Amino acid sequence: MRLRAARPAAVRAFAAQAKKQAPRMSASVTVATGLTSAAVLAYTQMDQVHCDWLSWLGFGGSVKKDEFADIRAEIAKIIGDNAAGPIFVRLAWHAAGTYDINTSTGGSNGATMRFAPECNHGANAGLGLARKLLEPVKAAHPEISYADLWTLAGVVAIEVAGGPKVGWHSGRTDAASGESCPPDGRLPDASKTQDHIRNVFYRMGFNDQEIVALLGAHTLGECHRDRSGYVGPWTRDPHGFDNSYFTLLLDEKWQVKAGMPLQFEDKTGDLMMLPADLALVVDPEFRKYVELYAKDGNKFNQDFAKAFEKLLHLGVPTKKN
């Protein structure tokens, strides 16, 4: 099996949209050449309108509206140069996924993963690479908080991969120390099944439909033995965002993969699923949403965008009028 490193369809879509919008937008960044350059340039052009829209709503924090397009374009270029889309989604997800609605602790606000003990939590293994890749953006734009930067990187990564546009606003601040780091164990454990999944996501305020939509992010990326102990991609296009995670869950016959820890593989041995993934087809309530999203990719995109936006803004202050 040959895994695709980029998704030409997504590049064409960005370029086509930019051309359509070009008369009322202007680009502010010149980007590198290569397969991703069209996507990055289109991204820069399109986001001028997005920034104006955010300003009109009263969002924007301490970053000027015309700087969001620059930041987004720089993130997109890093993604193109380093195939970093999936790990940026994981960074944003893990920064936000520690939130507890009962105590109003954790979440993306604070960017506490910069500190021990959170940076050393097993679930965050390998994310130091993602944080390091974003340091040049932070250096060029010191006015944006790490918490805003990490979550914005996840949003940009979804869109560059061909996924939906996810709502995002700034306003997160950075903690001064690790005193507010959430306890270990708040993120999902891939070795567990539906009871654990519900406990983790209900703690953040998500329902079953939102849980399945969010886990559809496994359409991106792959596991690495030195990070999670698992190995392999979930789908045949780990850099493209679509509903294939759900179709594969239903269509493939998943068998136990030799070795430890426990994971599953398709008949080719190229693709894998984890116990938490297969829990979505075993549990009848979860399964009905898996079947829905396998049949309707547009519905998945819509529901994922809403759920991911909600995740990234848990505990984040909104600007008052």
Image (spheres, rainbow, N blue to C red):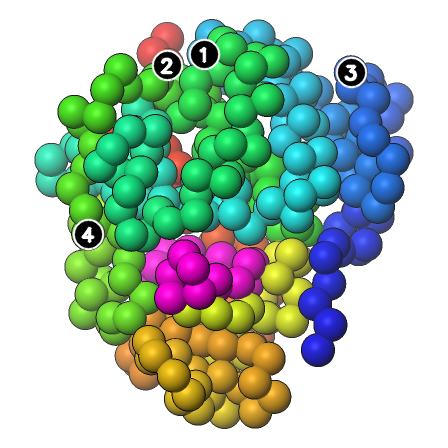
- Residue 294 coordinates in the image, percent (x, y): 54, 74
Mark 4 is surrounded, within 10 Å at the Cα level, by few (under 14), some (14 to 19) or many (20 or more) other residues, namely: few
Residue receiving disc 4: 185
Residue 221: name its quadrant. bottom right
Horizontal side of 235 relative to 25 (left or right) equals: left
* Segment tinted magenta in the rendering: 206-229
Distance of mark 1 from mark 3, alpha carbons?
20 Å
- Residue 307 coordinates in the image, percent (x, y): 41, 48
* In contact (CB < 8 Å): disc 2 and disc 4: no
Distance of mark 3 from mark 2, alpha carbons?
27 Å
Looking at the image, tell me whether mark 3 or mark 2 is earlier in sequence order.
3
Q: Which of marks 1 and 3 is in front?
A: 3
State the quadrant of the N terminus: bottom right
Distance of mark 4 from mark 1, alpha carbons?
31 Å
**Under tag 1, what secondary structure?**
loop
270 above or below 147?
Answer: below
Q: Count up the numbered dots.
A: 4
Looking at the image, tell me whether mark 1 or mark 2 is earlier in sequence order.
1
The kind of residue tagged 4 is Gly
Looking at the image, tell me whether mark 4 or mark 1 is earlier in sequence order.
1
Q: Which of marks 3 and 2 is in front?
A: 3
- Residue 199 coordinates in the image, percent (x, y): 18, 59
Q: Nearer the viewer, residue 54 or 99?
A: 99
**Under tag 4, what secondary structure?**
loop
249 above or below 302?
Answer: below
Residue at 18% across, 27% down: 180
Looking at the image, tell me whether mark 2 or mark 4 is earlier in sequence order.
4
Q: Which of 6 and 104 is in front in this view?
A: 6
Asked whether 224 falls inside the magenta stretch, the response is yes
* In contact (CB < 8 Å): disc 1 and disc 2: yes
The kind of residue tagged 3 is Ser
